[in-house]
Amino acid sequence: MVVKITIIIVVGMICCIVGSAGATVYVMHSVKQSELGELANYYQTRTINLTVYFQNEIYTLQDNLSDLEEEAYNLNLGLQEKISELESLKSGDKYYMHDPIYTEVAGFIASDKTDEISYDFENFDCQDFSKAVNDNAENKGIRCAIVVIYFEETNTGHMIIGFNTTDQGMVYVEPQSDEWVENLTAGNEYWTDCIVPKGGYTYSDDPNDTIKEIIVFW
């Protein structure tokens, strides 16, 4: 009888232990399921956020690439224009401009017809004469300078042309009359001290033509 009671007690204890263990396992399973759910939600949210971020980055890079492609196209277009200009220059005399010898300058000035144009204060003055002769010289491959002369009294200017000859150095020409200009130095009077008149012509004194400054532009 005692043995039977003992067996019953042991069996009851085993049942309690098994039941308790089952309950514990159930609770732990529920906790793990909850943690797994939260972890899944976290990674799902993170995946969505990263996908949106990288998609925006892709759009930005695509926009930058389009801008770079457009810039490269414009640069290439500009380069082609410069190459075309260079080829055009190479096919003409200006590309081969050179400093002339004195007799070459004399021959050019004698053949140039700019001096036959009538002076017009409003429409064709010293600047126009100088620019015309300068362009004509460079079109023939002769390097020519624009020379600006400032006078002391009036602080006004006059414009002529110049050539850096290889045999006689710098020489100057009055483009309105094809007369040579010598002694072009500050302090001299331009019309009486510097101009070498043609055909025996003599310029009268001008109190306002004392040279203050000379600037040469190539």
Image: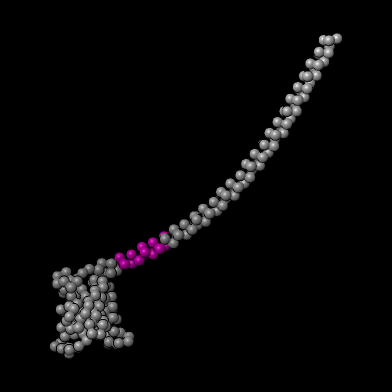
**Percent position of residue 56, x then y:** 56, 52
* Residue 203, visible in the rendered structure: yes
**Between residues 217 and 99, which one lies in front from this camera angle?**
217
**Percent position of residue 121, x then y:** 30, 87
**Percent position of residue 160, x then y:** 23, 79
On screen, residue 162 versus residue 13, left or right, reads left
**Residue 11: in magenta span:** no
Residue drawn at x 72%, y 33% is: 30
**Between residues 69 and 159, which one lies in front from this camera angle?**
159
**Which quadrant does the C terminus fall into?**
bottom left
- Colour theme: one colour
**Residue 88: in magenta span:** yes
Q: Is residue 29 above or below residue 138?
A: above
**Percent position of residue 105, x then y:** 19, 75
* Residue 136, visible in the rendered structure: no
Q: Residue furthest right?
A: 1
Q: Is residue 7 above or below residue 105?
A: above
On screen, residue 97 versus residue 39, left or right, reads left
Q: Quadrant of residue 135?
A: bottom left
Q: Main secondary structure of the magenta part?
A: helix
Count of picture labels: 0
**Magenta residues, as a range?**
76-91
Q: Quadrant of residue 37?
A: top right
Residue drawn at x 28%, y 69% is: 94
On screen, residue 140 versus residue 77, left or right, reads left
Q: Is residue 52 above or below residue 215?
A: above
**Between residues 59 and 133, which one lies in front from this camera angle?**
59
**Which quadrant does the N terminus fall into?**
top right
Q: Quadrant of residue 18?
A: top right
Residue drawn at x 22%, y 86% is: 208
